[in-house]
Image (spheres, rainbow, N blue to C red):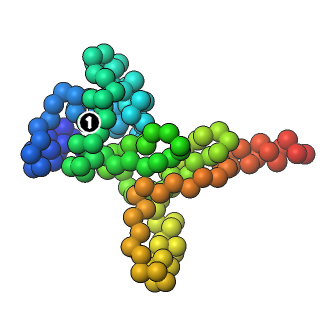
Amino acid sequence: MSTAAWDERLRAQGYRITPQRQLVLEAVTRLGHGTPEEILAEVQRQAAGVNLSTVYRTLDVLEEVGLVTHAHIGHGAPTFHSVDDEVHIHLVCRRCDAVESVDADLAAPFIESLDATQGFATDISHMTIQGVCRTCREATRSAQR
């Protein structure tokens, strides 16, 4: 999304684009997925005076206006990513902590089943599935041989 589109989205909801908001948005875009601490480190490459509380407040505003969203990938801080991304599910490896994004359509049968049997409308935009990635599984198989 362009800076003009960010500005338009923020202004439509009563906010203006500040240098800090622009830096945080750009950091989220560059990182793809990032915790507030990772976003802060990225922002501080250009603006050393920005602190973690500014990043958290900015992320709250950006999420409120629909420019970023978050997922709880692990036990720590949430991970933020741009809403420009397609809706996806996060696959998180318990061994190496790798995070892979997969198309949310893979979960369609499960979501449809929840709706049909439970009447539950599922929001999978925050969905994370823990497991073991292909690389770690193959390493385990190789070590067992």
Extreme-top residue of the structure: 48
Q: Where is the C terminus found, in terms of image quarters?
A: top right
What residue sits 51% from the left and 75% below the top?
Answer: 109
Residue 139 lies left or right of residue 49; in this view the side is right
Task: Determine whether 56 is above or below 46 in the image.
Answer: below
Residue placed under numbered mark 1 in the picture: 57
Q: Residues within 10 Å of mark 1 (few under 14, many from 20)?
A: few
Q: Percent x, y for residue 22?
A: 22, 32
| Image-based side of 145 in relation to 4, left or right | right
Please say if 52 is above or below 15. above
* Number of numbered tags placed on the structure image: 1
Image position of 41 (left or right of 19) = right
Q: Quick one: which residue is furthest to the right in this view?
A: 145
In the displayed structure, 89 sits above or below 123; it is above
Residue 82: give x, y in percent of width and height.
33, 45
Could you tell me residue 45's position as x and y percent? Answer: 35, 18
Quadrant of the drawing holding the N terminus = top left
Q: Position of residue 96 (x, y in %)?
A: 65, 39
Picture residue at 42% right of the left edge, 30% below the top = 38
Res 123 → quadrant: bottom left
Q: Is residue 97 visible?
A: yes
Whether residue 97 sits left or right of residue 8 in the image: it is: right
Q: Amino acid at mark 1?
A: Arg
